[in-house]
Image (cartoon, helix red, strand yellow):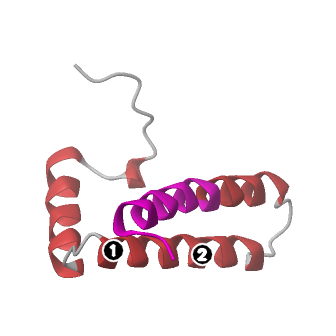
């Protein structure tokens, strides 16, 4: 059984792993079949939800922060790519 810090580190590593698997699925997905993409996103959500519990983060507060940051910085909906930050 992992201690708290080792568990948190393992979850952080799992988040990176799942993000990589999503990217691989994106690169492999040449059809309209979105099942693989949905599965990988579900895995990412699971890890993120577990990370919030592991770090005792309030999901509502995280979502509020996400909304504020979206208002302040914009979202990805405009499809602009950030090149640098000053």
What's the residue at 27%, 69% (across, down)?
55
> Foreground residue, 67 or 16?
16
Q: Say left or right for 49 vs 24.
A: left
> Foreground residue, 5 or 58?
5
The image shows residue 11 at horizontal and vertical percentages of: 48, 64
Q: Nearer the viewer, mark 1 or mark 2?
A: 1
What's the residue at 39%, 48% (across, down)?
78
What's the residue at 42%, 38% (across, down)?
80
Q: Above or below — where is 40 with respect to 23? A: below
As measured in the structure, the alpha-carbon distance from the residue carrying label 1 to the one carrying label 2 is: 16 Å
> Foreground residue, 50 or 65?
50
Q: Quarter-wise, where is residue 51 in the image? A: bottom left
Q: Say left or right for 27 vs 22.
A: right
Q: Say left or right for 40 vs 54.
A: right
The image shows residue 27 at horizontal and vertical percentages of: 78, 51
Residue 11 is one of the magenta-drawn residues: yes
Dominant SS of magenta comes to helix
The residue that label 1 is drawn on is 54
**Dot 1, how many residues are within 10 Å of its Cα: few (below 14), some (14-19), or many (20+)?**
some
The residue that label 2 is drawn on is 43
The part of the chain drawn in magenta is: 1-18
The image shows residue 37 at horizontal and vertical percentages of: 69, 70
Label 1: which secondary element: helix
Verify CB contact (< 8 Å) between mark 1 and mark 2. no
What's the residue at 59%, 75% (across, down)?
43
The image shows residue 9 at horizontal and vertical percentages of: 44, 57
> Foreground residue, 64 or 16?
16
Q: Earlier in the sequence, mark 1 or mark 2?
A: 2
Label 2: which secondary element: helix
Q: Say left or right for 38 vs 52.
A: right
């Amino acid at each position: 059984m992992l201690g708290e810090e080792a568990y948190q580190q393992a979850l952080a590593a799992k988040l990176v792993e799942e993000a990589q698997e999503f990217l691989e699925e994106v690169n492999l997905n040449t059809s309209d079949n979105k099942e693989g993409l949905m599965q990988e996103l579900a895995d990412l959500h699971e890890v993120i939800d577990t990370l919030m519990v592991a770090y005792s983060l309030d999901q509502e507060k995280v979502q509020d922060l996400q909304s504020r940051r979206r208002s302040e910085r914009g979202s990805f909906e405009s499809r602009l790519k950030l090149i640098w930050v000053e």
